[in-house]
Image (tube, grey):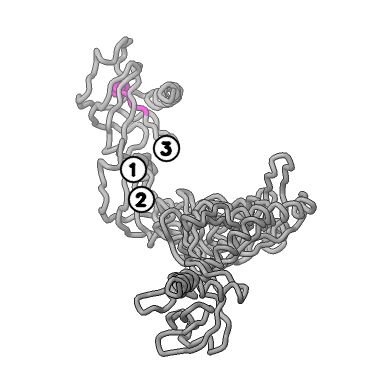
Amino acid sequence: MEKMETSSETQTTVETEPSFAEMFKASMKERGDEPVKEGEIVKGTIVQLTRDYVVVDIGYKSEGQVPIAEFLDPQGEVTVKAGDPVEVLLEARENDSGMVVLSKEKADKMRLWDDISAACERDELIEGTIIGRVKGGLSVDIGVKAFLPGSQVDIRPVRNLDKFIGERHRFKVIKFNKKRGNIVLSRRVLLEKEREELKKETLKKLKEGAILQGVVKNLTDYGAFVDLGGIDGLLHITDMSWGRINHPSEVLNVSDEVRVVVLKFDPASERVSLGTKQIQEDPWHRADEKYPPGTRVKGKVVSLTDYGAFVEIEQGVEGLVHTSEMSWTKRFKHPSKLLNPGDMVDAVVLDIDPKAKRIALGMKQIEPNPWTLLEDKYPIGSVIKGQIRNVTDFGVFVGVEEGIDGLVHVSDISWTERIKHPGEKYKKGDEVEAVVLNIDVENERFSLGIKQLAPDPWETLNERMPVGTRAHGKIMKVTDFGAFVEIEPGIEGLIHVSELREERVENPRDVVKEGDEVDVKIIDINTADRKVALSIKALSHEGEEDYREYLRRQQTESRARLGDVMKNLKK
């Protein structure tokens, strides 16, 4: 019986003895703590710092270790000491060394994810720093990495996303997935909301004539878009300055603050036209007072055309120097032969029309007019020598001075020769002498004559061949009304058909022909009109007593006939 009792007691003892786990669990219950689970954040106390680890007591059967690197600040200094409370993540209850595996870094991240999740639920904003460029957008550090799509960076599309790297902004979380570790941010929705608030305020003061402060947002070839506060206005290039502007970038940069005046506002379309030059007075309003004719000015060549150069004499005021006003003596096919855009030039105001916004300028007026000196230097009748610079249908141009040519008209080449084209006698480069006939300073014309070097043979024809003189000549031309005979080189006379024979002649060609040499009598000379009347018939009356009376009668008749003939020739 005793053995059985002993056996029974032994059996009872074995059945009631608790395991270590049960004892630990019971101990935890006595302390009021639940057993810690892997993957949870637990509170602990730092009990020791070693070179590589921070030892943390979380109230478990053994202490845990956290790499000391997780407690270093950016300068590499340890931020904790023994006795400090700390929250850590229990990664594993034991490692190979029987130590609890803990992580402060992962605990911080888990806590951060919880904070972000809570912010999303409360529709709150978070701050972060843009740290890099990734496919489709930017990477943002908000404690964990988040993605900012390119379309959500700004209200308008951004070409250069790299300029945002390093900037810190506020963002709205538009997509959150804790399991996948996916956070998508937006800056655009914040800007749009802010812009709407600004727009309401701007619209209250937006009206034509209002002067506002704005910021240049964008530049184009035709102007600049200016943010007035929630609403954009277009500042056209023609309204930027009273002066000439080739591109808006010459006067503005993106982000510049500008004062603008509202030129036009359409509330329906919310289109706004702006100007900056209208804030200042139009320089043309008093230009006629400032630049009366004769005023000497200095300006910059801003453009060239086929007919001249535009010179800016002050911002917004330009004048035209016509090619004819560039030089007294030189002639240019194009102003670019003398000037280039950007050149600074001196000029004189010739005329001004403020209403039409036109100023006529002259550059040559800066220097004395060489034409005014020519009359003293080359008096009428003086002889000059020069080289032929050009040959035309109507005459030859002879170089007098640099840039000044004199014209020998075809009619002033010879007293007697009939010259159809000056090229028959002269060519470019020939050196000739000529007499100064006239100088027209106003029209810049210098007239020369070559035939005037010798006496006019017509002036002395009466002396050499008085009326009644018998002459010998060659028939040069036969017409229906008579024949022309050359009695001296270059001097021709007319034998009227009635003076060919005593009997009536119907057709002069029946009596004479071109090339015939004939004897004739001079029956009339008109020096003023350079006409000579000849007769073959009169030769038969030589020696008669009434010859003088015959000549008197023939002169009268020949003048009438010759006058009619010349009238017909002119017709």
- Horizontal side of residue 140 vs 407, given as left or right: right
Q: Amino acid at mark 3?
A: Thr
Q: Amino acid at mark 1?
A: Thr
Residue bearing the label numbered 1: 392
Q: Nearer the viewer, residue 14 or 567?
A: 14
Residues shaded magenta: 533-542
Q: Quadrant of residue 550?
A: top left
- Badge 2 crowding class, 10 Å Cα cut-off, few under 14, some 14 to 19, many 20 or more, is many
Residue 534 is a magenta residue = yes
Judge depth for marks 1 and 3 and give the one in front: 1
Question: How far apart are the two marked residues, 1 and 3, measured between alpha carbons?
Answer: 30 Å
Q: Quadrant of residue 292?
A: bottom right
Q: Nearer the viewer, residue 248 or 185?
A: 185
Question: How far apart are the two marked residues, 2 and 3, measured between alpha carbons?
Answer: 29 Å
SS for dot 3: loop
Where residue 221 appears, as percent x and y from the top left, is: 52, 51
Q: Nearer the viewer, residue 341 or 41?
A: 41
Q: Earlier in the sequence, mark 2 or mark 3?
A: 2
Residue bearing the label numbered 3: 527
Judge depth for marks 2 and 3 and give the one in front: 2
SS for dot 1: loop
Residue bearing the label numbered 2: 397
